Amino acid sequence: MTALRFHWRPLKSCGNDDPIGKKKDEKESVKKESSTKPANASILTVNGGSSSIKFALFEAGDSLRRILEGGIERIGLPEATLRVKGLSQADNASRLVTAPDHTAAVGALMDWIEERIGRDALTAVGHRVVHGGPKYSDPQLITRGMVEDLRQLTPFDPEHLPELKIRVVNVVDLMKLQPQTEHPHGLSDMDFDELFTKDKPVIFAYHAYPWLIHRLTYRRTNHGNIHVRGYKEEGTITTPFDMTVLNELDRFHLVMDTIERLPQTGDKGIYLKQQLKDKLIEHKQYIDKHGQDMPEIRNWKWSNPK
């Protein structure tokens, strides 16, 4: 399992390894540190997603004490929202923010911190790195060299759920779903169970009304585990792929549906599901701006794995 690591960036220091930020004369930096150090120092931790930013604020002392947590969701959409939950009801807050991108979202977060505790109260910021490779396994100061090293790891993105086994069945004759006693093309119960199993969840993507598949399979052993995704009479003038999204027949909804039926996927499944939700937001933002599907959708071609 991939470890989660935090890399820290002190806000008012500079090191010999050129930490990211404005370089300052060492004496000037030390002098400013002593003159602006807040009475109650705080540490901010941040976790950035494709359409959200989650954060927590800790009071620094002999031990860290979390005093606030929250996030900015739906970045890139007009209804981007900052939500905060504190130790008491008075600390809770929710408000719309202008966040067309992550840079603006970070600005909105820092504006809120300025209102809440003042930026000078922050002594460090920690950001999660999913995988630091062989060189970065402990919390440490961010440098330009580290950022470049982490960029070199992006080609090694692992499979999301490599232990999960999926069977793909392409149904080209719907009458095969019926028993032999109902139609001459029908599969025997043994053959049907061999394909669709007796007890495993089945996600059936059907580009028409779902009720037909349920009627054709209602006598089958595993009928209770067959979940059909089909036409919901949702549509408008939009892109081809967005039509499948509106009817929840797209690749992202089908994978999320699969994860929901397989609780054994655990935290990995939960994380992947959130990534897919973020991807759907990215899809909506792209078609609203460009009027066509994303290149990864538009230019996709079937390939045979070696």
Image (cartoon, grey):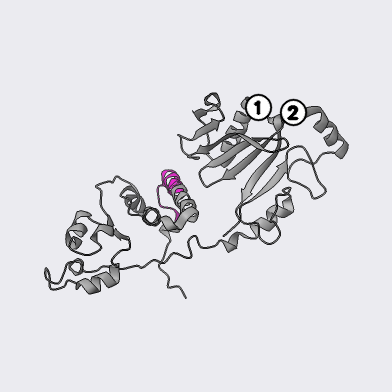
Compared across the picture, whether 41 is left or right of 200 comes to: right
Q: Could you say where residue 3 lies in the image, as x and y percent from the top left?
A: 61, 56
Q: Are marks 2 and 1 in contact (CB under 8 Å)?
A: yes
- Depth check: give the residue in front, 45 or 299: 45
Query: Height in image: 24 above or below 183?
Result: above
| Residue at 54% in and 23% down | 90
Tell me the quadrant of the picture where the N terminus can be found.
bottom right
Which residue position holds label 1? 117
Q: Residues within 10 Å of mark 2 (few under 14, many from 20)?
A: some
- Depth check: give the residue in front, 5 or 27: 5
Which residue position holds label 2? 38
**Is 294 one of the magenta-colored residues?**
yes
Q: Residue furthest right?
A: 27
Q: Could you say where residue 286 lies in the image, as x and y percent from the top left?
A: 45, 47
Q: Residue furthest front?
A: 62
Marks 2 and 1, the one that precedes in the sequence: 2
**Is 276 one of the magenta-colored residues?**
no
